Amino acid sequence: MFVGSLSQSVGELTGVGKKTLADYSNIGVSTFCDLISMTPRGYEDRSQRIGIGEAPDGGWVNTVVRVESVGTFGRGRKDVKIVVRDQMSGHKAFLMGFNRTYLAKTVFPSSFYHLYASVGKYGTSLQSTQFELSPMREDEVYNEAAVAIALDGGILPVYSLSGSLTQKSIRRDVKAVLAMYADRIEDELPRSLIEKYGFMPLGQAFKEIHFPSNEKNLKAARRTFAFREVFYLQLEAKRRPAADAAAPRVPIPSRIDQAESHFIASLPFSLTDDQTKVLDEIRSDMAGDASMNRLLQGDVGSGKTLVAWVSALHVASQGLQVAFMAPTELLARQHAQVADALFKDIGLRVAYLDGEVHGRPREALLKELACGNIDLLIGTHALFSKDVVYRNLRYVVIDEQHRFGVEQREALLAKGVDPDVLLMTATPIPRTLALTVFGNLNVSTIRTMPKGRLPIVTYLVDESRRDDMYNAVGVEMKRGHQAYFVYPRIDDEGNSDLRDVQTMYDFLSHVKYPSFKGALIHSRLPEDEKLSILDAFSRGDLDYLVSTSVVEVGIDVPNATCMVVEHSEMFGLSALHQLRGRVGRSSLQSWCFLAYEPSISVDGKKRLAVLKRTNDGFEIAEEDLRIRGPGELAGLRQSGFMHLKYANLETDVSMMAAARDEVSAILERDPGLIELDNCVIRKVLGSKA
């Protein structure tokens, strides 16, 4: 437990006013505890001089430079090019400040600066788009002691920013809190474990994780926090199933009844071997004494939802109810439309519920649900509202499970009596994570795609090839096929450097494709209007859609063969793979064009190259894991499902196993041990424990 006032508001720190307090709130920081629980997303090693030309391609330099020239270019002349020469190595580099007009007014030719930058090779020149310049006096440049001080900034943390927050201001505030409280933090982890594994005292670990004195101590601090993460997560995972075990349960026979058999036979295609195998696993689980807790993972378009429908029919045929929850109204409504069409001839009673269903229609629906006259209820978070009562909820299916938090899932499960649970995701989760963190979760995988599918051909498109991309999409639309154009923003918002859906819809409809029919769709449109547009696109009444990422999941239009993603460097690998999965859903050859801006970093281009190299979602997920870290896996950090800030699923397998064994031994001695009231533990778990 913490001794002191780590629950104090960050607004009590010197220099933190109302604006800064609001910016901190935007990144989830309200208290001193929140502040020191922030994890640096990286570090800047400013402990030694590295000159231009001496770092590896894309590596960081830390040196003194003289500015040779400063100029502007680009649309609106908002981009700045600064030519600098290293005073030590003699090499020249071009600093490209995209949309950083202010640099033209604050950086001066013939002046000297301390440069910290990521420098890479672009053709025959050295360039940087990520750089920081700090002015130096000429007398300092020729003073070895002054240069040494300027270049020896130590190892500095790099945090996620919001609004007016800067790296300098966050570092200042974190230092202030650590100076007051780091030495007064007590550790709830059993002392025997701290000594057994040689962990740092918790206060020291906080100091070293934020401001490491050296690389060795940083690794030791990370290891100290990593063990605590997996220890407390495993503790929670092992305690949760025990509470469910006492509930009475009637098994569902695993045999396939007539309605289910007839439904499978009526499909216009055969189930894949993987789909059949997963259905057998689900039926076997449901026939057991304990409730099913299964994760179904499969690549985009592999047929996970069909497995959910067949298994839902298996349950409903026994007179039991099924709840199918999706993260958005758009996706939930589409699922409801599909389910209604599939089941209308076999008597399965399907209903849809979301937050927009009010008044008498809602009252009538809830009455039918409570009486057991609805077999399958499909909807959003509304499925676990207080007034929603099921007669005999036995099966819960959660689509895009990573978009829901722990408490949201548990609220829905509480509507039934020990229901079977199927979580579905298109982002594969490594077995290590499933065993270590998810406790008793079983994992099913669909790897095979439906027969006749062709691999999607992916192109990386720079500015010089943009017209070729537009022409290629035009050829496909002339053939009667359809296309998606996806942009990261809805409108211009005063920044014309980023393409947005509204501006580009006007451009595409009037300049590029005046003879084709398109439509604009984004999150601000009413749900009914979005559904109407998607229905028109599905019927073939529209040739193309101009959209934000609202089309990322749940859109199945076999005639669509082209996906264009603009500013693709701004999307994560998994999101890009999901978007690409909107095409290639038939035997037609499909294409994906990932357009990127000149400001893309070397690492950014390498990331996009992964999409060009492979269509395998499992390989892409592993690459995403390596790039973004386990805490971002499948969006888990944002969803509140878990926080793996320090533990690494690839390198900490033995640590995870040790934590699991220690938790088992502790709970065997004292099942009620450890109340999770430490604020850092709550930050680790990402929810109320």
Image (cartoon, helix red, strand yellow):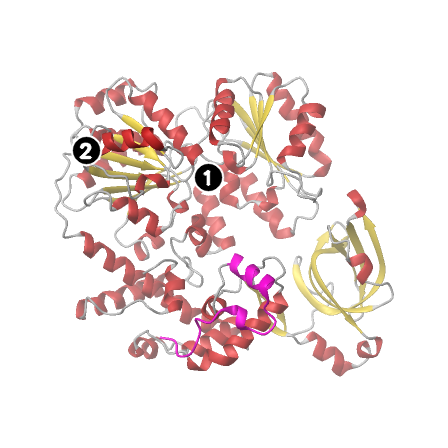
The amino acid type of the residue labelled 1 equals: Asp
* Residue pointed to by mark 1: 616
Classify mark 1: helix, strand or loop: loop
Q: Can residue 276 be seen in this view?
A: no
Question: Could one spot residue 196 in this view of the protein?
Answer: yes
Mark 2 / mark 1, whichever is N-terminal: 2
Q: Quadrant of the N terminus?
A: bottom left
Nearest to the observer: residue 143 or residue 413: 413
452 horizontally vs 270: left or right = right
Distance Cα–Cα, label 2 vs label 1: 37 Å
Above/below status of 48 relative to 562: below
Q: Which residue is drawn at 59% across and 48% down?
A: 606
Label 2 environment density (alpha carbons within 10 Å; few <14, some 14–19, many ≥20): many
> Quadrant where the C terminus lies?
bottom left
In the orientation shown, which residue stands out farthest toward the front?
359
* Secondary structure type for disc 2: loop
The segment highlighted magenta reads 1-27
Image x and y of residue 295, in percent? 31, 44
State yes or no: residue 12 in magenta.
Answer: yes
Q: Which residue is depicted at the point 58% across and 43% down? A: 609
> Taking 237 as reference, is 98 left or right?
right
Confirm whether the magenta stretch covers residue 632. Answer: no
Which residue in the protein does label 2 denote?
A: 320
Give the label, 2 or 1, closer to the camera.
2
